[in-house]
Image (tube, rainbow, N blue to C red):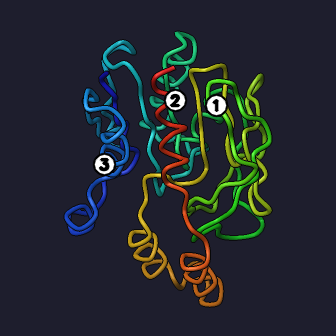
Amino acid sequence: MIIGLLEAETLDLSVSARFGSYGDMFARLLQPLDAGFQFRYYATEQGQLPAAAGECDAYVVTGSRHNAYDSDPWIESLKSFIRTLHQEKRKCLGICFGHQVIAEALGGEVRKSPKGWGVGAATFSVDSCPEWLGDCPQTFNVLVSHQDQVEALPEAAIRFAHSEFCPNGGYFLGNHIFCLQGHPEFTGDYVRFLIDKRRERIGLQEAEHALSTLSRLTVETPVLQNWLDRFLHM
């Protein structure tokens, strides 16, 4: 299976040398699931997209510092490509910005949270578990780092999960689109790096609280990997 990694942000070389690109983070997360996975990278923030939807078997839209509701040409092109994927019912996984831009592309609404930053480790409650995911726990822990969030889901989308901070923490459309606000691909070290980098923007008290969640909550990576495995192989 060829998985297209639509990188919605190109990280500084100093950062990617230490942590990998956003595409690299997904490749590390997904490769153990299937030795047959092959990854094709697209610098989407720089306007690079597949020539046709059938170029890959499945796609991942990564996180980004950008806003899904902005009208930058590359964001508009990405939204158009997402609509094509949806029309052709091709597999597409959206994470954080990807979760948000897919919602915007398909008629949903994204806004900044009035609560400020959601960052650190967070607990989400499962609202509706599709059959293709198998048995779902009632709650799961995942790393988060966002201000924007999906306020209104696209038509026909079913809410998968929510948290006290985030009303729409995940959703799915059929068995071809699956989106999560959280970051299964992030590591605790990378989230600590982001918190330190954005400490003043987040707020000193909020940043300290976010750091404390990283030691209090165990991120359930195997559960998240199992979901992604089932989604991609369905």
User: Does the CB distance between marks 3 and 1 fall below 8 Å?
Assistant: no
Where 76 sits versus 156, above or below? below
- Percent x, y of residue 77: 45, 29
Query: Which residue is at 19% across, 64% downward?
Result: 17
The amino acid type of the residue labelled 1 equals: Gly
The mark that comes first in sequence, 3 or 1, is 3
Where 142 sits versus 90, above or below? below
Is 6 on the left or on the right of 37, as rendered? Answer: right
State the residue position of label 1.
134
Question: Element under label 1?
Answer: loop
Is 115 on the left or on the right of 204, as rendered? Answer: right
Q: Nearer the viewer, mark 2 or mark 3?
A: 2
> In what quadrant of the picture does the N terminus appear?
top left
The mark that comes first in sequence, 1 or 2, is 1
The amino acid type of the residue labelled 3 equals: Arg
The mark that comes first in sequence, 2 or 3, is 3
- Percent x, y of residue 221: 49, 54
| Alpha-carbon span between mark 3 and mark 1 | 23 Å
Question: Element under label 2?
Answer: helix
Question: Element under label 3?
Answer: helix
- Percent x, y of residue 107: 71, 28
* Badge number at residue 230: 2
* Badge number at residue 213: none
Q: Nearer the viewer, mark 3 or mark 1?
A: 1
| Alpha-carbon span between mark 2 and mark 3 | 17 Å
